[in-house]
């Protein structure tokens, strides 16, 4: 295919589409697919040509992806103010998953083999909006105040009510007396100094500055194959563009350093709250320190795991002895939100809890087997990784360019403050806490009844 060739996309089955993707040059055609592990560093298409090709398929791909979401989920807005996020935002309620001709009770009585054979599992891996392309993708609640993060080729796929607070609360282990330091403000390079000067020590303040500083990234840089119209000084992303206010906005991308493109997993940005008590970082990579995570994110994840692309697009190599040290000095003091119903051991204070919450804690530590991985004394994690083998319940097949393969080992995320962090699981396939309870009820074959599920959700909201 020549550099001047342009493709007009009529349908997926009748045309050839040239796409430059993060993990390599993929040619989709009626005859098959060719994949390279590396991206084309000798780019022979102009920015305009690449943009035209991406825009030609934007609408069709968005429609295909939204059709998949609507088949799987009820996306109508359902929230409650009985319990809100730390910043006051109503939390979404569910379950939102659509069942195909069965009830939850009937599904609960079926074996994994029966569910798989009839393709009834409601929580299959969630594809990226354009799985072959990948890359960082930000929700509109973030791109509105930070328009430099807009991609011309893709729009975020989940409605805002399913996402965390746009400007999450910030709690510091060093200054619990201050409560929420953010107070509804989005922390940026323009306001961090006036807000945190006198609150942080000089190293922490410098670390926060670096976390808010833009650096080149695969889709946001000066090269012709970028995914932003901008070609000015407002290029690049910051650590806290995804980990907003040290928490998360659930910006999504593909795990860049695990498997070939179609096998890679969608990954939703996890919260950075409580990293001081964590001993594993990265949903699947098992990085051993927050320093490793801080350094490797810019070397690897920023460029979708492609070392050649990182060199081409201007990877920012952080100095381990100063910059990484300063950044982690700040990260280590990000605290979980207050949980007034928990005692100093992380257990429910029975005098403050409702009967439903108490029953939920009993289930959590017993029948539901949550405490096997999420220990209260360890802030509801075991700092380990586990493989739930959810693929027992669904067929491994291609959906929206993604191979529905096994998840493999996934780290045990802390559950403290979990109500602030929808959607759930590493790829966000469980939109609400109710969905999460239904997922684990099936995967662990717990056989919880409806009241037990409600009690579980009530307890999780306390954390």
Image (cartoon, grey):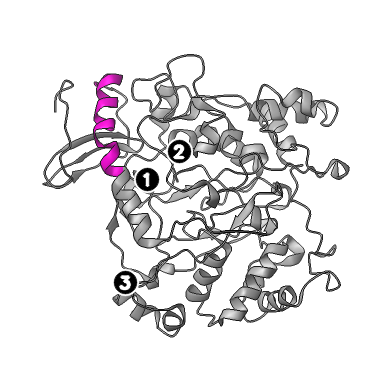
Tell me where residue 296 appears, x and y as whole percent: 55, 37
Please name whichever residue, 327 or 347, is drawn nearer the observer in this view of the structure: 347
Q: Is residue 409 above or below residue 156?
A: below
Q: Is residue 67 above or below residue 129?
A: below
Q: Is residue 74 visible?
A: yes
Tell me where residue 453 appears, x and y as whole percent: 59, 75
Inter-mark Cα distance, 2 to 3: 30 Å
Q: Secondary structure at mark 2?
A: loop
How dense is the environment of label 2, judged by Cα within 10 Å: few (below 14), some, or many (20 and up)?
many
Name the residue beneath numbered marker 3. 119
Name the residue beneath numbered marker 1. 129
| Residue 137 image label | 2
Q: Is residue 338 above or below residue 177?
A: below
Q: Is residue 57 magenta?
A: yes
Please name whichever residue, 275 or 147, is drawn nearer the observer in this view of the structure: 147
Q: Residue furthest bottom?
A: 109
């Amino acid at each position: 295919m020549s550099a001047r060739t342009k493709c007009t996309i009529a349908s997926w089955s009748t045309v050839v589409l040239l796409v430059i993707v993060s993990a390599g040059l993929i040619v989709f055609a009626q005859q098959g697919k060719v994949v390279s592990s590396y991206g084309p560093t000798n780019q022979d298409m102009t920015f305009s040509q690449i943009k035209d090709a991406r825009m030609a398929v934007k609408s069709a791909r968005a429609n295909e992806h939204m059709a998949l979401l609507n088949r799987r989920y009820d996306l109508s807005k359902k929230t409650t103010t009985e319990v809100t996020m730390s910043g006051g935002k109503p939390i979404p309620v569910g379950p939102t998953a659509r069942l195909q001709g069965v009830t939850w009770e009937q599904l609960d009585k079926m074996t994994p083999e029966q569910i798989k054979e009839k393709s009834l599992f409601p929580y299959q891996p969630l594809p990226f909006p354009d799985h072959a392309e990948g890359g960082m993708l930000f929700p509109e609640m973030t791109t509105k105040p930070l328009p430099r993060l807009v991609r011309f080729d893709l729009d975020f796929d989940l409605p805002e009510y399913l996402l965390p607070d746009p400007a999450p609360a910030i709690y510091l282990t060093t200054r619990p007396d201050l409560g929420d330091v953010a107070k509804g403000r989005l922390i940026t390079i323009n306001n961090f100094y006036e807000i945190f000067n006198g609150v942080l020590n000089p190293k922490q303040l410098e670390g926060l500055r670096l976390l808010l500083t833009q650096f080149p990234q695969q889709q946001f840089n000066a090269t012709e194959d970028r995914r932003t119209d901008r070609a000015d000084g407002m290029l690049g992303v910051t650590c806290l563009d995804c980990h907003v206010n040290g928490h998360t906005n659930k910006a999504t991308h593909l795990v860049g350093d695990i498997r070939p493109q179609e096998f890679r997993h969608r990954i939703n940005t996890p919260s950075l709250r409580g990293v001081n008590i964590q001993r594993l970082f990265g949903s699947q990579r098992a990085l051993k320190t927050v320093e490793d995570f801080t350094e490797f994110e810019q070397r690897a994840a920023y460029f979708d795991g492609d070392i050649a692309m990182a060199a081409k697009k201007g990877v920012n190599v952080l100095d381990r002895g100063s910059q990484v040290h300063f950044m982690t000095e700040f990260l280590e003091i990000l605290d979980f939100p207050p949980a007034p119903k928990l005692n100093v051991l992380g257990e429910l204070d029975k005098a403050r809890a409702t009967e439903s919450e108490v029953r939920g804690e009993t289930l959590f530590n017993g029948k539901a087997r949550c405490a096997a991985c999420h220990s209260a004394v360890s802030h509801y994690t075991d700092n380990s990784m586990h493989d739930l083998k959810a693929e027992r319940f669904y067929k491994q097949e291609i959906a929206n360019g993604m191979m529905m393969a096994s998840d493999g080992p996934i780290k045990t995320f802390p559950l403290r403050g979990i109500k602030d962090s929808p959607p759930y699981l590493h790829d966000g396939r469980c939109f609400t806490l109710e969905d999460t309870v239904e997922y684990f009820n099936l995967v662990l074959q717990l056989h919880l009844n409806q009241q037990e599920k409600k009690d579980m959700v009530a307890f999780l909201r306390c954390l």
